[in-house]
Image: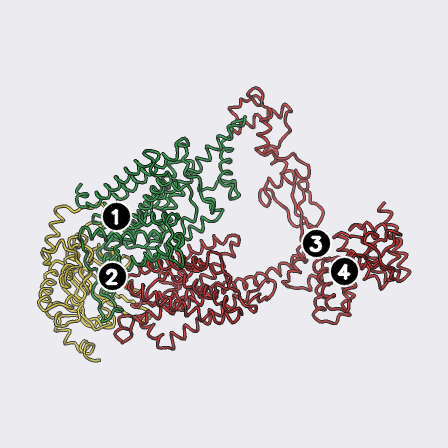
Amino acid sequence: MIRTLLAAVLALTLASGLARAEAVGDILDTNKALVEHASRLTIGPVIDKLAASGDPRAETLLKAWGDKLLGLRKSDGAFVLLKRKGAAYQLTQPDGTDVGMAKRSDINILRPNAGVRRLIDGALVEFQLSSPDLKTRTEALSIIDHHPEAGQLKPLEASLKAETDPALRARKERLLRLLTIRFGENSAKRIAAINSFGADTGLDLRGTLNPLLDTHRIIAKAGEKPKGNIDRPLIPGKTITTEAAYDLLVARGEAPARQTPTARRQALEAHIEGGKVGGIPLAQLSDPEARDRAYAALEKAGQVPRAATTREVRAAVAAHDYWVVYAEADPAMTTAAKAALAKIAVKVDAMQALDLLLEALSLASIYFLAAIGLALTFGVMGVINMAHGEFIMMGAYTGYVVQQIIPNYTLSLIVALPLAFAVTFAAGVAMERLVVRHLYKRPLETLLATFGVSIALQQLAKNIFGTQARPLTSPDWLDGAWVLNDVVSISYIRIAIFVLGLVFLCLFLWVMKRTRLGLELRAVTQNPGMAASMGINPDRINMLAFGLGSGIAGSAGVALGLYAKVTSELGQDYIVQSFMTVVVGGVGNIWGTLAGAALIGSLQKGIEWLNPSNTLAAQTYMILFIILFIQVRPRGIIALKGRAAGD
Amino acid sequence: MDFLRKNPSVLWFLAILAVFTLAVTLMAPGTGSGAISTSFVKTLGKTLCLAMVALAMDLVWGYAGILSLGHMAFFAIGGYMIGMWQMYARTEEIVITSLAQSPIPPTATEIHQGIASQIFGVVGSSHMPEIWYFAHSLPAQLALVVLVPALLALVFGWLAFRSRVAGVYLSILTQAMTLALALWLFQNDSGLRGNNGLSGLQNIPGLGKVAQETLSVWFFWASALALALAYLLLAWVVSGKFGSVIRAIRDDEQRVRFLGYPVEGFKLFVFALTAVIAGIGGALYYPQAGIINPAELAPIASIYLAVWVAIGGRGRLYGAVMGAVIVSLLSSWFTGGRVPDVPLGFATIHWVDWWQVLLGLAFVLVTLFAPRGLGGLVDLVTGLHPPRRHGAALGPDSGSLQEREAQE
Amino acid sequence: MNSLLEVSGVSVSFDGFRAINNLSFQIGPAELRAVIGPNGAGKTTFMDIVTGKTRPDAGRVLFGEKSISLLKRSEAEIARIGVGRKFQRPTVFEDQTVTDNLMMALKAARGPWKVLFWRPGAAEHARVRELAARVGLAEALARKSGELSHGQKQWLEIGMLLAQEPRLLLVDEPAAGMTLAEREQTTAMLVDLAKTRAVVVVEHDMEFVRRLGCKVTVLHEGSVLAEGSIDHVTADPRVIEVYLGR
């Protein structure tokens, strides 16, 4: 039935091809049955005909159809275009003649399904491609991008010449080449299109090339080479497991299914006769071999279906060869696609390496920010400040509070950074005066006392701000990411953190190298006794160093708060890594901290890249690496040497 | 007996522990009047286990000067090792019972697979990992309770001490070790059920018929016995020249080297010995707690251990026990929500929220003002006064070096 | 005379600075030797190398009749072989009693296991009492060494060195901070000790060295500048230049 209809349609189409500019209304009427019950499989020719009719109304009509605004008037079955007017519809004939109003109940609205709508959209693309409206043209290209169809090739090519917008023109050209790869009329053209891209890393290109290399597995008699575009043979036991190979045979219906132990057990249970199965007493059936014998006995008696034994499986598998065959028939095509993808892969790998580098850099700057204050206090005073993480948290909460008061995010950020510094500077000085000062000669006890402060501060933050995460919103200009291409991109926040890290590095270097405070700090670091006898008050220096280190932690906290949520555990998340950074980097030198942060950041990213599914394992391996690293360089990458190192 | 005569505190300790055990036995619901609940008996038993790790911590930190932030990891490993056997054996009982209902007797493989899918279904696996190879055997797992912590401590300690990592560096490194172990256990494919941990450990395989109230007393006795033995062992260890040497290592490691003692060997010995004690403590603790998961290895747990020992008083064994018992019991009292709130008019202090703050501050105060901890109170009673240990300052002001630091 | 310690061609540098430069040195089994030199001459580094604290970049350090190389050995091993070192500042274990300090230093097995099961017998107690008497601490056996005076700590440390029974004793500036009477006592003790073992005294003080009356080695910029009797070296124009010239 459908076939005859199709033939009729075809004949009509051919006939109408002679008469130019056939009215769309006529086409609809001729194919009324098809249109009314449109199906994706049969409607194609009608849509094509409508699109190719040359009637200026074609676009309007197709659009109305796709938008469910085409209907049949119940009274006479005529096609009408609908326009909603309140509860009723304004009706128009396909040729544009107004035919008055009608109620909803008087019309059969056509509701094309998604498949049909896609065909309609495809046909519409042709009109849209040449539409004077730039937005419509852009949308049309998006449709092609998402649902490439063979029919789009010609219209796209045709619309190219008239395209005035250079950006759109470039996009059209690219899409045209992509469509050519998919639907080009011969292999030569398609291969040329493939080669025209070179090592382009666009996802769209890879999305086009990959389907060309789709494969499926086929079975052939042993020794026979199958027809088709062969990719590679599969060797049972090596490139394919024997079970998988056998399952291929089973799927083809050429072998009985393998039996699962459960199925066998159930089969045996179903044939218990007088305490025996197949003549074997039940008590013995806890032995798998006895079960084999029992099943064989049942098989022999014809009571159970034959099940493949291991030996049978092996024999069946050996009797066949297994091949991977391309869906694409032309070997030249697959070769070209493979070559192109290989070229792309090399470039993508390079890009990924770059991306990884950027990520590592960003992580390193986070660790650097978190560790720099710690390194300062550790370097100058030999004191491990376990509450350092809580100072980071304190800075982040300061940022949050500032945002509650100043609603402008940019302004609040500008206020929060120095304010957080001031708040944590004060907290640091207070802690130094009250606690640390009394414990200078007992570093391990400082570690524990500062830990006491740490748990108190953490709980305090929980009591004040609650346990749920508080948002620290970044200003709009920090949203989004800097996208280099499909592979390489980095969010602006990460860039900002990197810049902040640089700023702190420069600030730190400036303080250390160019100011009196820095000079005194370095003097106390190297030889406190000597510094004291030169008139430097180590007490004051220690206090300032502690304040400075804590202040930097506070500012870093604002930045980290933007990057992650602000919780009372924020500091805890970074503290161990900060310790690692200081330990690996070496004490008493900012470059050491930088090197430590770089090493830890890149190491973590590197391990995550090697084992992307498992970030927990990555951290485990990283810590193990650090433990081993300490073996080689117990005093860190950049260590003070000689007598200054104090041993 | 010469040893006991010279160390009267050992006798005192054992006597107090014996009285305490007797009192608990008389009040426990399983064996006595039932004045205290089964869960409280368990809490007390667990506290004794914690006191045992605190003893170990005191030896390694208070005596040998190694501030290890990893001993709770050994404690948890001990728990995991015993937990593996418990889980395996319990599941085996259940699986065998359920398979026995079917008409055909199960094969060994079927039982094995049944156990595996019972245990590991929760992490989406039905395969028994290699590390469960000995899980069916109680003696083997008991041996592992001792061997695994010892081995880990030996390997880690060898690496760390060999490269002369000391002081805060070593503390940070031990913390890193703990964190690495915890993160590894958190993975589902670690073979120990990821963050689900091992559960149902309060049921002892083969003792299904014994009521929990009786079991709790048995475990309490076992914990008390283990604590007593550990105390005796450690008191003996520190009483002789060995104790002298490790205290000397704490005070001046380089000088001990020039006396000819292999400092690394001593540290390794102490580290491994205390790891074993911690492991045994864990093996007794977790069957009373009922569940173990990787959160138990969080670095914070080990720091709390240091807090107990510091509050109790380092360098004396009974101090560590005092600290662990008092702080952990107080902690469970405060966090249990049974402490009355304090209304201040403008605000109310909920102890559940403020206990941590209190603990943190108390800890700072103890470190600052009572470095000898609660054990210092005992000195007040007995009238002992240790000498000032630190030399005079070399320079005129307080920031200058002191003699002991300036020597190198 | 065959030598107990033979140091030859030893060099070591820190960050490019040559602390010891092709140093060679020998000492017999029962000899007193003074090593002098201005600041930075490498005296302390020399002792560090012999005791295993610092590893030299080049050279040999051989000890004893069997010519055991000390280079690959740890500080503890070298101490067990028979090299004792006395630091400039007294380093005793202040938290422990005089008896404990001496007991620890007594020659005995040093491994953890052996130490764990080692308990002092009557002989050991007698030896400790004897040593304490020798260094004038017989009354202070039960006191914590932290309570001792500076001079007593010096003596306790010397007592501990004696307990170690070293064959070679390295003494760093023993006279520093001592009264005249104590210096004389120390001199006598060092001379006495050198009758049974090799003693190397590193000293600044020419007057003290003269009183020791032994062979003197002068170090300068990491190598031996002169060697001989005190009168011989003080007459050497190069030594005069080094000490007084600049």
Task: Give residue A518's position: percent from left, percent from top.
Answer: 36, 74
Element at badge 2?
strand
- Residue type of the residue flagged with mark 2: Val
Where residue B223 sits, quadrant-wise, is top left
- Residue type of the residue flagged with mark 3: Pro
- Residue type of the residue flagged with mark 1: Tyr
Identity of the residue furthest to the bottom in this view: C246
Going 62% across and 31% down the picture, which residue do you hit? Answer: A307
2 or 3: mark nearer the eye: 3
Q: Which mark is residue A331?
A: 3
4 or 2: mark nearer the eye: 4
Q: Please, which chain is the residue tagged with disc 3 on?
A: A
Q: Please, which chain is the residue tagged with disc 2 on?
A: C
Q: CA distance from mark 4 to mark 2?
A: 88 Å
- The local crowd at label 3, few if under 14, some if 14 to 19, many if 20 or more residues have their Cα within 10 Å, is some
Q: CA distance from mark 4 to mark 1?
A: 87 Å
- The local crowd at label 1, few if under 14, some if 14 to 19, many if 20 or more residues have their Cα within 10 Å, is many
Q: Are marks 4 and 1 in contact (CB under 8 Å)?
A: no
Q: Which chain is green?
A: B
Label 4 belongs to which residue? A152
- The local crowd at label 4, few if under 14, some if 14 to 19, many if 20 or more residues have their Cα within 10 Å, is many
